[in-house]
Image (tube, rainbow, N blue to C red):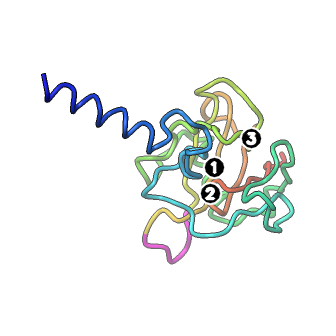
Amino acid sequence: MKRAWAFACIIALSAILCGCGKESSRNVTEASGASASEAPGQPAQGASGAPAASGAQVAGALGTITKTQLPAEAAETLRLIKAGGPFAFADDGVLFRNTALLLPKHPRGYYHTYTVRTPGATDRGQRRIVCGGPRRQTGDCYYTDNYYASFKRIAE
């Protein structure tokens, strides 16, 4: 009986101290859909490229980038998305949750994320393309070079 009571107290105390259920207690990587092992290393920037006051861009304030303005590696990633692969990393094509709502709101499962190679990087780097809609379609894609802190819509 004492063990059950002690266990219940530990759970209750953990919930109180950790702010369990509070939206404000979630860290930036959780909110963006990123994993803690891939936390961003650069400050957040808004669509204009200037640091955003809140640490992230304002929802709906997406800048645009043309395919010709993208780095060559991003253009190659778009080509691979259209072809259905093969992708260099196992995590390419996984669900992007958009919990920070930096991209237009859509039902869960709409967005998928793909790595854009970074020359000289020993890991996946911070560059990604996130595409919405059916796989192999690139009509609703966004580019980030700061690991989901801000996005630019890729213009057709």
Does 110 sit left or right of 140 as displayed? left
Residue 103's disc number: 3
Residue 79's disc number: 1
Q: What is the CA distance from the residue labelled 2 to the residue labelled 1?
A: 5 Å
Residue at 45% of width from left, 38% of height from top? Answer: 16
Q: Which three-letter amino acid code belongs to the residue tagged 2?
A: Glu
Element marked by disc 2: helix
Q: Which three-letter amino acid code belongs to the residue tagged 3?
A: Leu
Q: What is the CA distance from the residue labelled 3 to the residue labelled 1?
A: 22 Å
| Quadrant in the rendering for residue 84 | top right
- The residue nearer to you, when weighing 131 against 17, is 17
- The residue nearer to you, when weighing 24 against 16, is 16
- The residue nearer to you, when weighing 60 against 56, is 56
Q: What is the CA distance from the residue labelled 3 to the residue labelled 2?
A: 22 Å
Find out whether the residues at labels 3 and 1 contact each other: C-beta distance under 8 Å: no
Q: Which three-letter amino acid code belongs to the residue tagged 1?
A: Arg
> In the rendered structure, which disc, 3 or 1, sits on the residue that comes first in sequence?
1
- The residue nearer to you, when weighing 97 against 19, is 19
Q: Whole-percent x and y of residue 97?
A: 59, 36
Find out whether the residues at labels 2 and 1 contact each other: C-beta distance under 8 Å: yes
Q: Whole-percent x and y of residue 71?
A: 70, 66
Q: What stretch is highlighted in magenta?
A: 117-122
Residue at 66% of width from left, 23% of height from top? Answer: 107
- Label the magenta part by its dominant secondary structure: loop
Q: Whole-percent x and y of residue 12?
A: 36, 32
What residue would you read off at disc 2? Answer: 76
